């Protein structure tokens, strides 16, 4: 099956310069422990799909500024194509820390970088 459309949007705006993205199937548990038989006892809270973004080398100052502005808010809506389900999903996310680094000062180009988007709520 062919995948059409934008793979990732933040607040309705396409994310540019993506080299790759990964959808993590992260399960969250509460009060997890093992009993004397080695069996796990825990309360399942749900799946929290973390999205790992990897950007290309050679982004311009304008492109970096656009990406920076998309990620500068404490929380934002992310619409993404879920690789496991084949569906487009929109949910509220925040991001982890990331660093920007110059690739070529003279030409104003930046090295690629990675950032993770972490969901606020579990996937429904």
Image (cartoon, rainbow, N blue to C red):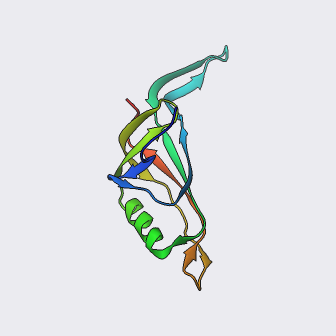
From the viewer's perspective, is residue 85 above or below residue 100? above
- Can residue 55 be seen in this snapshot? yes
From the viewer's perspective, is residue 37 above or below residue 90? above
> Of residues 109 and 99, which is closer to you in this image?
109
> Of residues 28 and 37, which is closer to you in this image?
28
The answer to whether 40 appears left or right of 65 in the picture is right
Residue 17 at x, y = what percent?
51, 60
From the viewer's perspective, is residue 33 above or below residue 91? above
> Of residues 67 and 31, which is closer to you in this image?
67
Q: Which residue is painted at 50% across and 45% down in the image? A: 51
Q: Which residue is painted at 62% across and 18% down in the image? A: 35
Residue 25 at x, y = what percent?
53, 34
> Of residues 89 and 43, which is closer to you in this image?
89
Determine which quarter of the picture holds residue 91.
top left
Q: Which residue is painted at 63% across and 16% down in the image? A: 39
Q: Residue furthest bottom?
A: 106
Residue 101 at x, y = what percent?
58, 72
Of the 4 image quadrants, the one containing the C terminus is top left
Q: Which residue is painted at 48% across and 75% down in the image? A: 61
The answer to whether 85 appears left or right of 22 in the picture is left
């Amino acid at each position: 099956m062919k995948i059409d459309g934008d793979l990732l949007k933040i607040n309705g705006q396409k994310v540019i310069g993506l080299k790759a993205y990964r959808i993590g199937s992260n399960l969250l548990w509460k009060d997890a422990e093992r009993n004397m038989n080695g069996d796990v006892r825990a309360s399942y809270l749900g799946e929290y799909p973390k999205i790992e973004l990897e950007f290309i080398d050679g982004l311009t100052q304008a492109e970096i500024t656009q990406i920076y502005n998309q990620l500068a808010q404490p929380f934002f809506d992310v619409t993404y194509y879920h690789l496991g389900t084949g569906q487009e999903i929109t949910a509220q996310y925040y991001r982890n820390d990331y660093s920007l680094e110059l690739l070529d000062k003279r030409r104003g180009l930046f090295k690629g970088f990675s950032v993770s988007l972490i969901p606020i709520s579990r996937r429904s």
